[in-house]
Amino acid sequence: MPRKKTGTSAPRAGNGPERIRVEKSLATLGFFSVRGGIPRDKSTERTITLKRTIGGEMIDVSATIIASKKFGFPRTSDQDCYFSILSFVSEAVSRGARIPAMLELSPAELLRRQGKTLSGDNYEDLENQLLRLATTTIVSESAIWNAGKKQWSKDVFRVFDRVLLKGEELEDGTTARRHCIWLSSWQIENFKNGYLLLIDYEKYSRLRNEISRALVPLLQVWLFASRRTGKFEKLYEDLAKILDIKVEQFPADIKKQLGPSLDELIREGYIRDWAIERAVGLGAKRYKIVFHHSKAFLNEIERRAKAQLALPELDDLEGSADDGGAISEDEAHRFGDDLIAVGVHPAVARKHARTLEREQLDRASRIVEYFRSSIDHAKLKSPPAFLMSLLKADLEAPVELRVRAAAVDVLQRGANPELDAEIERRAVAELAVMRAYEAETDEMLSSLLPLELAGLNDRAERLLDVEYPSNHTWSAEARQRQMRVILRRLVREGG
């Protein structure tokens, strides 16, 4: 059955407290998506990959959201319901009361706080929202923070430990006169330890578009983390995955899809402006969404930071570097993909990409484009080694490129011939090490039984799609080469 359309209803201003406290992991995970509900393909799992700094190293983490077959995935309207429940929690905390583990809430009041009429359909929707939130499971692979233990957790979580609807029987045999909701213990622990966001509930209530509302908690974290750069950039395809919306291919369609919501965020003062731009990288066209900071909104969340509320550590997520010249881990990863696609060994490609700053990445991208379009690879003993020579020389002194120039002319533009020779020598040495590794590993592969090799090939194909989603845009030769790289890695890891 198709997913049920959620419309554009949102909480009405004036219902509930001015600000509400929201647990930060859940708010920024992509748990509440724009589409939600039951997918057409009846799938019950959705995995979101994020980047976290753990032990000083930026790594990929993930959260798998497992929905019930009956209720489907949480959506933006469920976020409205969840926020309305947290409005009662926030009121209790503001009065100096303890965070209640169990809340007894009137269905009518929950609907009023969401700006909905007291109709039979809305009462039924509310029950389904509560049951959907109670039955959805999150399998965290270091994606959810445990503030008590001060560590990213590998565990299984739910938003509510239990829900008992109005009219159902309680343990003492009486009938529940209100909806009874038990907040999850991990969530309460994070509230107590201040790992939360403080959301302007009145401003959120005025938003009419689902994408706008889904972006509010995300923007609060992203814009604070990038506050010294004046803007935050997010790859469109990654943003679409978090929001669970269709990935459009052309800027005009992206603008049509996101424009009304982002313009609404401008009107409400969350952002000053936004733009769609080509992302750094070659091959398939990629786009990024650039969010420009609103001074008023930034001042507001900085005030919350001083109050020790609701804000992330600066190294907590992708795109958070204060240095305007730094590039995100995602940009480095994608440039590494571009190098791998033209034959550079993955370890060398990843290592080089991580060393680049913004200006260097822009120049490096032009060098790769030059290498692809203007260099006669047949005249080179090792095209990948030659490319790495150019890239490393550029870090010492910017390499000038001349369209359609001979390859040797490019190297001659280096100001220091001795430096050029040393760079070339290192590249050749690195290449020799790579070749030895490849030869040794290929010998191991050749000793496998046909059935074992077939199994490895199957695994390598699956990993290729996971690690390089855009591999279908590569040439057959580049795809086969990367398959071989993964095969070698698998056999080295013992299959």
Image: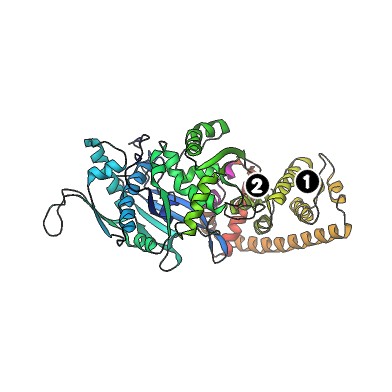
Image quadrant holding the N terminus, namely: top left
Q: What is the spatial separation of the Cα atoms under label 1 and label 2, in whole angstroms?
A: 15 Å
Residue 57 appears at what percent x and percent y? Answer: 57, 63
Category of crowding for the residue at label 2, using alpha-carbon neighbours closer than 10 angstroms: few (below 14), some (14–19), many (at least 20): some
Category of crowding for the residue at label 1, using alpha-carbon neighbours closer than 10 angstroms: few (below 14), some (14–19), many (at least 20): some
Mark 2: which secondary structure? helix
Query: In this image, 411 relative to 307: left or right?
Result: right
Residue at the spot of label 2: 478
- Residue situated furthest bottom in the rendering: 149
Q: Nearer the viewer, residue 77 or 477?
A: 77
- Residue under the point 51% across and 34% down: 259
Relative to 201, is 492 above or below?
below
Amino acid identity at mark 2 = Ala
Q: Nearer the viewer, residue 57 or 179?
A: 179
Query: In this image, 468 relative to 391: left or right?
Result: left
Residue 260 visible to the viewer: yes
- Residue under the point 47% across and 39% down: 268
- Residue under the point 11% across and 57% down: 173
Indicate yes or no whether the magenta region holds residue 110: no
Specify the label residue 377 is tagged with. 1
Q: Nearer the viewer, residue 21 or 28?
A: 21
- Residue under the point 49% across and 47% down: 219
Residue 454 appears at what percent x and percent y? Answer: 53, 54
Mark 1: which secondary structure? helix
Amino acid identity at mark 1 = His
Residue 144 appears at what percent x and percent y? Answer: 43, 59
Q: Kindly report the secondary structure that dominates the magenta region of the rendered protein.
A: helix
Q: Which residues are magenta?
A: 460-472
Q: Quadrant of residue 329?
A: bottom right
Relative to 385, is 32 above or below?
above
Whichever of labels 1 and 2 marks the residue nearer the N terminus, that label is 1
